Structures are given as C-alpha cells and as structure tokens.
Amino acid sequence: MNKSSLSGILRSRLFWKVMAMGTAVWLWNILVIVTGILVVHRHVNPNTPLVTYTYNLASAQWAARQNMYDVPETMNYMPQFAIAYTPFRVTPAPWGVILWRAVSVAVLATGLWRFVKQFFAPHSIHFFLAATLLALPLSAAATQNGQANVILAGLMLHAVAFIASGKWWPAAALTMLAIVAKPVAIVLVLLAPFFYRALRLPLAVAFAALLASPFLFAGLGYVLSQYRGFLHNLSVCSAAPEYDYADITGILWPLHVQLSHNVSLAIRASAGLLTLALWWPGARRLPEPLRAFWLFTLTAGYLMLFNPMNESNSYVVFAPALAVWALHFLRDRALRWMGCVAAFMAFSMGILPNIVRPWFGNKFALAYHPIMTFLFLAMLAGWISRGKAANSPVDSKERLRRDKTR
C-alpha cells in the first residue's frame, strides 16, 4: 500500500467511523473479559462471595418448588426473575455467571447505542464512543459483582428509546422486562403514562401478562405462595436502613442523622410526588428524544436517591443519564459548562471512590454519589425551568415527532 492510498484511508470518514465503533465495542468487551477473569479467580477462591449466588439459589429453589423467600440469602426480586435466570444457572460454573454478565453488558451497551443513535444522528458513532468512555467507569463495579442493575439500566434505555419513537407495545414489553430485572422499574410505569397517554393500554396489557406468566411454569398454589413471599420481602426492604447505603441516607450519615421508618417513608413518598411534578413540565417543554430521556433521567435519579438499600454500585443505572446529557450540552457552546460538569460527575463517580478508599474506605461513595446525583438533577431541572430546552439541538427527524408521541 503506497502512501497516497494510506493517506486516503486516513482521511476517509468511513474509516474513522469504523475505528470509533470498533473502539467502543471493544471497550465493553474488555469490561466483560476483565470481569470474567475476576469471576474465575473468585470461583477458584470461593471465600469471596458472588451476588449471583443469590440468583442461582432462587432459581434452584423455584425449580425445586421451594420457597425462594425463606432462605438466608433472600432474593429481592419477583418470581419471574428466578425463571428468567434458569439458563444461567444450568450453564456449568463459572461460565453461567460470566454469561450473565456478558448478556447484561450487551443489553446496557446496545441500549446506550440505541439512544445515542436517536440523539446524535448523523454523528452517532463518535458520540457512542464518547458516551461509552463516560459511562464505563461507573458501570464497572456493578458488572464485576454481577448485579441486576446493569441489565436494568439497559432495559430501561431500550424502553425509553421505543417511547421516543412512539413504538408503544415494544416499549411496554421492555418496561415489563425491566421490572423482572428489578421491581423498582415500576417507577417508570408510574411516570410515563402521565404524558404518554398512548402507552397506558400497552402497559396495562403487558403488566397483566407479566403477572400471569409464572402460572405457565408452576401450579397455582405455589405461584401464589411466592407472590406472598415477594410482597412480604418488599415490606422488609422498605424499612429504614442504616448508614451503609448510597441513597438519601448516604447524604445524612456524615451528619449522624438517622431517619425513622415513618419519616423515611414520608420522604420517599414526597419525593415521588416531586418527581412527578418535575416530569410533567419537562415533558411539555422538551422535544423528542430529549423528552423520553428526561423520563429515564428522573426515573434513574429517583431510584438512586430514594430507593431503600441502594448501593454505590447501583449508580450504573444513572451512568447513561450523565453521559448522554453531558454530550448533549457539550455540543452547545452556550451550555458547554453544563456538559463539562456532567462529564466530571460521571467520571469522578466512577474513579474517585477507588482513589480515596485508603482514607475513607467504602463510605465516600455512599455520600458522594447521591450528592452528585442531587446536584445534577437540580441543575437539569433549573435549565428546563428557564424555558430554553425546546430550542435544544436534536436530530431534525426527531424534531418532527415532538408532538406525535404524546
């Protein structure tokens, strides 16, 4: 190959698009590969517990028709999760838990790509690489631990991307899968229909199908007993936690403030009403797909700040919100400072807790993550309230849909 041919390739837009997409894909692949190596190490050294042990146990309990919610390592999810996890349980160790992580990362990465493609056409490939660089550090810990929050974030991204396109039935189906991944995704179900009226029937039908699905795999009495166990487990999880969680209590623990159970429930319920109050004006002012992404951002933000027993690793759910909004603001000269702030938050939340761990242990992230989340949501709500959001740069095709998705 002569120099002129090489120079022509390097100047080719296609070449740089292929390089950008390949780099982004390989970054996600590297996360899976490194995580797989760590999982194998843990499998060889069984004294280090894996969160997927709980998933395996619940799936085995379901297969044996035993109570999934009456064991030391109780699963905090719906019975459908145990059914869905069966392929990973029956895959020989440690490949089952590695496969679970690979699938979770694939769902997250493709969900991010789906939304970036809507957000930043025709330069979506380069923006996908940038979004990957911002979201990956905050996604690594949850992937390493095998937490369901990784696939939850991906399913919610896919769901809101379909909502932005006005594809209500796929959106409803993916929202139900998100609830299977983690019941806290019900927040998305509660918020979306207030503006997207066309989504109400698909969500109702999909939710009925979700509730009925376990009866296809087990008898009436057993399924009902597991539903009762699930509801009892939810009431236990709603109790006021100690300081070692990264929700609103993480902001309070440095002040040595402990919330009572009743006060905690009142704050979380009030926050739900505030979230709804923020969703409605934002939905009216924002064009698609910003509107749908505002829905994702509020849902993720509420789950991070007001979901009981939220962990610092759970912020993988909020990582896509920070990454996409950062890139959105960075391409607007007047709002570039907001993009820099969001990018700093995303990167620092993923990196800083590891740097300061020798001095603060794991406590730093418990306060830092919710504080950054609260500040970011306040900044975003302030921007929307100023009424300039409707002029935000979006793809022209998506701008034509801004009033058709209601």
Image (cartoon, rainbow, N blue to C red):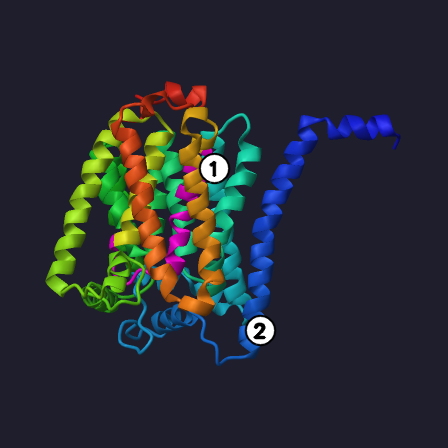
Point out residue 167 in the picture as x, y percentages from the top left corner. Answer: 36, 32
Q: Is residue 86 above or below residue 172?
A: below
Residue beneath the point at 15% across and 53% down: 267
Distance of label 1 from label 2 (alpha carbons): 34 Å
Nearer-the-camera pick, 353 or 226: 353
Point out residue 143 in the picture as x, y percentages from the top left corner. Answer: 48, 59
Q: Is residue 406 above or below residue 351?
A: above
On the image, numbered disc 1 is attached to which residue?
Answer: 114
Nearer-the-camera pick, 92 or 238: 238
User: Which amino acid type is shown beneath numbered disc 1?
Assistant: Arg
User: What segment carries the magenta color?
Assistant: 306-327
Point out residue 387 in the picture as x, y percentages from the top left corner. Answer: 27, 24
User: Which amino acid type is shown beneath numbered disc 2?
Assistant: His
Left or right: residue 3 compared with residue 247: right
Task: Give neighbour class at mark 2: few <14, some 14-19, many 20+ (Cα, 10 Å).
Answer: few
Q: Residue furthest right?
A: 2
Nearer-the-camera pick, 280 or 234: 280
Regarding residue 13, the answer to whether it shows in the image is yes
Quarter containing the N terminus: top right
Instruction: State which tag comes first along the sequence, 1 or 2.
Output: 2
What is the number of callouts on the image? 2
Quarter containing the C terminus: top left
Q: Residue 321: within the magenta? A: yes
Task: Give neighbour class at mark 1: few <14, some 14-19, many 20+ (Cα, 10 Å).
Answer: some
On the image, numbered disc 2 is attached to which residue?
Answer: 41
Give the structural element (helix, strand or loop) at label 2: helix
Q: Give the numbered dot on residue 21.
A: none
